[in-house]
Amino acid sequence: MANHSEQNDPIDTTDTTDSTGAADPTNTTGAADAAGSITPVNPGNPIDPTGPIGHIDDETLVTLRTPAELADALPYLLGFRPEESVVLIALHGDRGRFGGRVRLGIPGRAEDWPPIAEQLAQCLVGGCERRGARPDGVVAFLCAEPVGAESGQQVMERLRPLAQVIRTACGSLDVPVFEVVCISAGSFWSYCCPNEQCCPPQGVPLPRPGTSVLAAATAYAGAQVGVTPREMRARLTPWVSAAATEQEAALDAAGMALVHRILEEDGHAEVAADTLDLARRIMARMTDAPPISDRPEADLQDDDLLAHDEAAALILGLQDRTTRDQAAEWMEGDCAPPALRLWRALARRCVGAYGEHAAAPLSLAGWVAWSLGDTTEGQEALDMALCADPSYTFAQLLRHACTGDLDPEPIRRCLRRERTDRDATAVQPELPLPDEPLDPAAEPVGAAPRRRRPSRPKGGAGSRATERPSTGPQNRRRTIRRTARNDT
């Protein structure tokens, strides 16, 4: 079979549609199955397989005929506006129905482009094959903004080798690339169309957002284009304002109090209960607050609803594995949205030397976002959690499942079962065991002897040590990490 991806044939932009759909390879009936995951070459640029476009009815047919319509459709196909990304979307059937898709941040070094292109192509094709539908073609997008005095046209020329290696990589798998579109500085270029009348060298301005047929269909279905990855990261990034100093001081003070509480008898259980109770009260406070549609303003309101000492107590309390796992149970229903707001707010409070502590709230934010259907924010939050603590197993496992396009429902069932078992254990009274020696004559013949509960030592070497730890800043924070969190 010929390597079609190395041909320069332009996409057919003629109107070949009928009343039921289109015959060109850029017709969509809404997104099909999402692509599989891939282990990225650069961990800082994780590949992002995305899910369907909202909930557009399967009977709704939207035909995209030109590179302009493709460029305008990209945010609606992904659910957000990509930045500095290469995106591959699979096409299926004679009508070019959109299917799986993969996204990757464009590597900064050009020598990384060929292996990245090969992995992207293999990820897309392999993910579609696992779902029983090998793609019949691919549409690729290169999204990048100018750097410095660079123009959009110069960006397009700079990325032209990347477009070629993508076409070659897909062609080696016998999957032709029908179109490669570069989007930069508010304009787009086609690498495949030689017709300067429709695709001039200086580029074509993008249509005004929300004016395309797909935008109308998406809005009619009730779906919205989410924030960009950069905006998602901004909502989870620790403060750099003057308030960060006050928050770090509150974390220091809370850490000293928490260490002594945990070392007391039954202190661990009391700290866990207080942490979860405080989290519930803050979530109720956020729920009662007036809704704000503007995301930055909404985040500022959540910050105002959370005092420094409250944030410190929650951040340190969530370092405990069992406490964090119970908090992860707020992943559905009415409690999920305020929980996500709280975890975002706590991630913003992990300032200064407490940056590693952000792994817990970031993991919880990623889990809740994914459980609510926002795979993109889930992956961004989990990536940031692993940047804060690369060895954080909770985030590693969740990110593997999230990027692997797995269903979060099995995890939800596991957390529901844990909650049910814990509630059932809490209502069962513990039967007291007798302290007096039992009369052997009163025991039935053949009965197993009863065991006495061992008495707990009240002092000496067997009692819990209560020596005060070193009060140096580094030793104190390490003690907090060591005592307030089970290794995860």
Image (cartoon, helix red, strand yellow):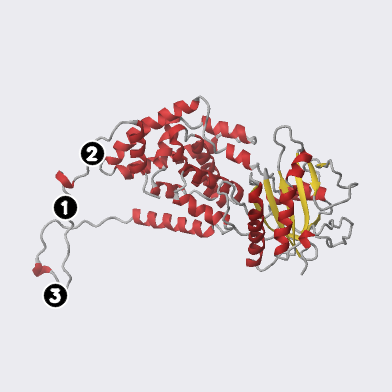
Rendered view: 49 above or below 291: below
- Location of residue 277 by image quarter: top left
**If you read the primary sequence from the N terminus, does the residue marked by circle 3 or circle 2 appear first?**
3
Left or right of 99, for residue 256: left
**Which circle, 1 or 3, is nearer the viewer?**
1
Q: Mark 1 points at which residue?
A: 455
Residue closest to the eye, 351 or 369: 351
Q: Do the residues labelled 3 and 2 touch (CB within 8 Å)?
A: no
Rendered view: 191 above or below 58: above
Q: Which amino acid does label 2 sit on?
A: Thr
Q: Name the residue under label 2.
A: 466
In percent of width and height, residue 185 lies at: 76, 38
Left or right of 435, for residue 378: right
Q: Name the residue under label 3.
A: 445
In percent of width and height, residue 473 lies at: 35, 31
Q: Which amino acid does label 1 sit on?
A: Ser
Q: Distance between the residues labelled 2 and 1?
A: 21 Å
* Residue 254 seen in this snapshot: yes
Residue closest to the eye, 415 or 130: 130
